[in-house]
Amino acid sequence: MALLPILRYPDPRLHTRAAPVAVVDDHIRKLVRDMAETMYEAPGIGLAATQVNVHKRVVVIDVTEDKSALMAFINPEIVERAGEQVCEEGCLSVPGVYEKVTRAERVKVRALDADGKPFELEAEGLLAVCVQHEIDHLDGKVFVEYLSPLKLNRIKAKLVKKARITA
């Protein structure tokens, strides 16, 4: 397994729409393992392949405290949404930034697992937020883009300045 570099906002590659995975093979399973290792090390609760500059529709999520329930979503699609919730979100691609975002309270997602088997999952609460957040990444959208233009510009300026200082 390998740790993968995580793209930082406002990197334009984060706006690349991910392509569907044609076949779940050993290459995709290795990507899932590497993404999981990267997510846990960061530490985070979700990671989309787009964030590690792999533009395939692959997501890993584990919202448990003890990191015991890794889920892989390949070609995920939300097929139902219900309710509304406002949650504070953060992102491994936008380090140190936490903002409130409105999302569906419950979602039903359809995907393939790491063995290529189709499944459906009904998620609510934090898991529903995480699923929506990561699928947004696959569609080229970062959570801060839900914020007002003023907030978004302040965040961009802060992150660009921070990147210059650490470079």
Image (cartoon, helix red, strand yellow):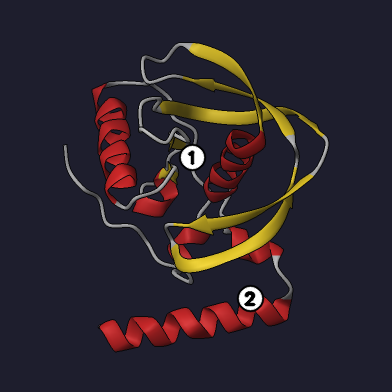
Under circle 2, the secondary element is: helix
Residue 132 showing in the rendered view: yes
The span from disc 1 to disc 2 (Cα, nearest Å) is 27 Å
Residue 53 showing in the rendered view: no
Q: Amino acid at mark 2?
A: Leu
Where residue 72 sits, quadrant-wise, is top left
Residue 142's place in the image compared with 47, above or below, is: below
Where residue 115 sits, quadrant-wise, is top left
Q: Nearer the viewer, residue 52 or 107?
A: 107
- Mark 1 vs mark 2: which is more N-terminal? 1
Q: In the rendered image, which residue does mark 1 sit on? A: 19
Binning the other alpha carbons within 10 Å of mark 2 as few (below 14), some (14 to 19) or many (20 upward) gives: some
Picture residue at 34% right of the left edge, 50% below the top: 43
Mark seen at residue 152: 2
Q: CB under 8 Å between callouts 1 and 2?
A: no
Q: Where is residue 141 shown, x and y percent of the image?
A: 59, 56
Under circle 1, the secondary element is: loop
